[in-house]
Image (tube, coloured by chain):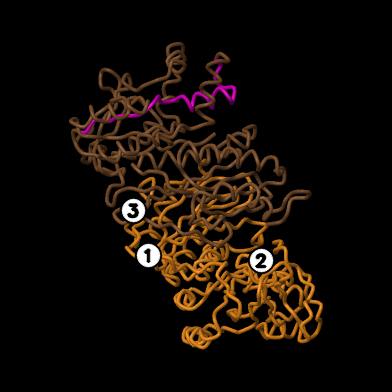
Chain colours: A brown, B orange
C-alpha cells in the first residue's frame, strides 16, 4: 500500500472518500475495523456475487472514474437482480495505478455514492492496493432473498416461456462503434456506447423475479451463450425466435441496413438484461410487474425437453437455428 | 475474459481447477450459477473481510503460484481469527497475466485446496479475469461468530493487558533478507523469508479470542502502527515493553549483532500475528487456551487511560518511547 506522491495516502483516502459510503451500514463499523458484520434476518439467506473489471479488458482506457465505478458496481447489481435478491451491501477492492490521483478517487467514490442511493446498497468494507499495472476493481455484492428462494440458472422447466428485459445487443454495437468498427450517427453512437459503458441493472424487477421465475441469469456473455448456459444448467432444450428479440431503434436501424450485424447483437455481450423462464400462467403477472416499474419485458422463446439431442438455439421464422457464437463473449 | 492461447479457457479452468474447491459448500452451487447462497444460522452473524495481494507489491515476482495462493487466502484468514470468527467460505477474484498458463493455475488451485482443508474453509464463488498487468488476487472471506460477539479494534479498556501471538518482526526481516538488505545465514534466511511468504493465521485461537478478548486485530501494518490503531479506535492509550516482545531466535541474533534492526522488527509489517487486549483476570485462561492449540501467547503491555495527551508507544526498560514508524507499513 505504497503511498502515491503528494496524495492523501491510503488511510487518508479511506477516511475522506470511502468512509462516507459506509455510514448507513452499522456493521461496516465506519471502515475502522478489519472486518464488517452482516446480520441476516431469520428466514432470509444471503446471495453473494463477485465480479471484477479491469482497464483495457472490461472498460476502455478513456472511460472516466465515474464510468468505471458505476460499471464495477452495476455488473454485480445485475447479478443480484437476476437472482431475485434485494441489494444489501458490497465490499470493494480498488487497485490504484500510478496515474491515479486523489481527484480520480474522489470522482470514483462520488459515482459510487450516487449509485448506492439509486440502488439502495451500502459499502461495508474492502481493500485499496497499489498496482504497477492498469486500474482494476473487484466487488463482492450481497443481497437478501427469502430462504430457499434464490432464482437459479437450473430451474427451467419444459413449457416455460423465455423472457428478456429491455433490449439486446446495444452494448455490443456500442463497443463496435467506440472501436471504430461500426459507423453510426452521433446520436446512435452516444446511445449505444452508453449501454456499453453503463449497465442498467434491473434491480426493480428482483422481487417479481423471485416471485415468478423458474430460472434466470443476467445476459453478460451474450444472449445466445447465456441461453445455452441456462438450458444446460436446467437439463432442458429451448428456442428463442430471433424476430421476437427486443431491439432498440438504433439496433433495428443498423440491422436493417446491414444484417451481418445480427450475430453481434444476439451473440455479443455486456447487455446486463435479465433472461428468465416462467410458466405460461405467470407471464401476465410478470409483465404487469415489469410494466409497473417501467421495465420492458418481452416473451422471446420457449423451453423444450432436454436429452442428448436437445439444443438451445436462436432460430429464424422458419425455425432454422442461426449460427451464433455460443461459447461465451470475449471482452474486447 | 479473453482466452489465453492454447489454454483451457476461462470456463474450462473453472471446471477443472476451481469447481473441486467448492464441492463441500452446497450454496456454491458447483460454481455453476451467477451467485452463491450463504445461510447464516440463527444466533450467528457473518464476519466479512476483504484483502487483495498484487505481484510486485505484496509478493515477489519470484514467488510460486502456491505461495501466492496461500498468502492471498491466509491474510484473510488472519483477519477472521483476530475477530474471533470461525472460517466459513470465501470468494476469489484471480487476474491472470499474459505469462500465466494452465500449469500455473493448477498449482495455484492445488495450494488453495490444501489450505481449505487445513483451515476448514470452502470456496463459494468468484471471478477470473485477464489483465495486461501483473497477477493479482482479491479474496473476500466469511466467518461466523455468535451474534454481537465479533471482537473489534475498539473494545480495549483501561487496565487490560496487551498480548501478542507467536513472534514479531520475522516477516520484515525476511523481506529485508530477500531484498539483499540484510545478510543472514542460509538457515535464518529460509526461516525468516518463509514468515514473509507464508503467513500462519492463528485460526485455532479464534474461539478463545471471541471468549476472552476485549479488542483485537492482526498485525499487518507493524506492531507499533497496529497498536496505535487499536488504542486510537478504543479511545485509550497504552504501552508495550520492547523487551517483552517475543522474538524468534533468528530475530534475536540479528538484533544482538546490530540493534539498528529493532525498528524494522517492531515497525515492519506482515506479521499476521494477533494483537489483543484482555482483562488481567482472563490472561491465564487465554494463555492456557493458546498453549492448548500450540500457539505462543505473550503478555507485552498494558492499556492506559485515553485523553488528549495519551500515547500508544513501544517503550524501553526505562519507559522511554522508541522512535518507530507508526503511520503504517509501506509494502516493498
Residues tagged by mark 3 and mark 2 found on one chain of the structure? no
- Image: B91 above or below A84: below
Q: Residues within 10 Å of mark 2 (few under 14, many from 20)?
A: many
Residue A162 part of the magenta-drawn span: yes
Chain label for disc 1: B
Going from N to C along the chain, the mark reached first, 2 or 1, is 1
Q: Nearer the viewer, residue B116 or A101?
A: A101
Question: What residue is pinned by disc 1?
Answer: B44
Disc 2 on helix, strand or loop? loop
Q: Nearer the viewer, residue A88 or A236?
A: A88
CA distance separating discs 2 and 1: 30 Å
The x, y position of residue A99, in whole percent, is: 72, 42
Question: What residue is pinned by disc 2?
Answer: B221
Please say if the residues under marks 2 and 1 sit with CB atoms less than 8 Å apart. no
The x, y position of residue A193, in whole percent, is: 54, 25
- Image: B159 above or below A205: below
Question: What residue is pinned by disc 3?
Answer: A45
Residue B219, image quadrant:
bottom right
Residues tagged by mark 3 and mark 1 found on one chain of the structure? no
Q: Which residues are magenta?
A: A160-184
Disc 3 on helix, strand or loop? strand
Image position of A143 (left or right of A321): right
Amino acid at each position: 500500500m505504497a503511498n502515491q506522491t503528494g496524495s492523501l495516502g491510503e488511510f487518508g483516502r479511506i477516511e475522506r472518500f470511502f468512509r462516507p459510503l459506509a455510514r448507513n451500514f452499522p456493521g461496516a463499523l465506519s471502515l475502522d475495523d478489519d472486518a464488517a458484520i452482516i446480520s441476516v434476518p431469520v428466514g432470509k439467506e444471503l446471495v453473494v456475487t463477485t465480479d471484477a473489471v479491469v482497464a483495457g479488458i472490461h472498460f476502455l482506457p478513456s472511460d472516466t472514474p465515474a464510468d468505471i465505478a458505476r460499471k464495477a458496481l452495476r455488473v454485480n447489481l445485475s447479478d443480484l437482480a437476476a437472482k431475485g435478491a434485494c441489494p444489501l451491501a458490497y465490499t470493494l477492492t480498488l487497485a490504484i495505478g500510478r496515474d491515479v490521483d486523489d481527484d480520480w478517487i474522489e470522482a470514483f467514490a462520488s459515482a459510487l455514492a450516487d449509485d448506492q442511493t439509486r440502488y439502495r446498497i451500502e459499502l461495508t468494507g474492502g481493500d485499496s492496493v497499489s498496482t504497477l499495472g492498469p486500474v482494476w476493481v473487484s466487488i463482492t455484492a450481497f443481497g437478501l432473498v427469502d430462504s430457499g428462494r434464490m432464482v437459479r440458472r437450473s430451474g427451467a422447466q419444459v413449457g416455460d416461456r423465455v423472457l428478456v428485459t429491455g433490449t439486446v445487443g446495444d452494448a455490443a454495437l456500442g463497443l463496435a462503434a467506440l472501436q471504430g468498427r461500426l459507423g453510426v450517427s452521433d446520436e446512435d453512437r452516444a446511445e449505444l456506447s452508453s449501454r456499453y459503458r453503463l449497465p442498467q441493472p434491473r434491480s426493480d424487477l428482483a422481487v417479481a423475479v423471485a416471485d415468478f421465475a423458474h430460472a434466470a441469469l443476467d445476459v453478460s456473455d451474450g444472449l445466445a451463450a447465456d441461453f445455452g448456459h441456462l438450458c444446460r444448467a436446467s437439463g432442458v432444450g429451448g428456442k428463442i425466435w430471433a424476430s421476437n428479440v427486443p431491439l432498440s431503434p438504433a439496433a433495428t436501424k443498423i440491422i436493417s441496413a446491414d444484417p451481418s450485424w445480427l450475430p453481434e447483437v444476439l451473440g455479443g455481450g455486456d447487455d446486463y438484461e435479465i433472461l428468465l423462464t416462467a410458466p405460461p400462467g405467470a407471464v401476465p403477472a410478470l409483465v404487469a410487474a415489469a410494466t409497473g416499474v417501467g421495465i420492458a419485458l418481452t416473451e422471446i422463446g420457449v423451453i423444450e425437453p432436454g436429452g442428448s439431442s436437445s439444443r438451445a438455439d436462436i432460430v429464424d421464422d422458419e425455425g432454422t437455428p442461426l449460427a451464433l457464437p455460443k461459447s461465451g463473449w470475449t471482452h474486447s
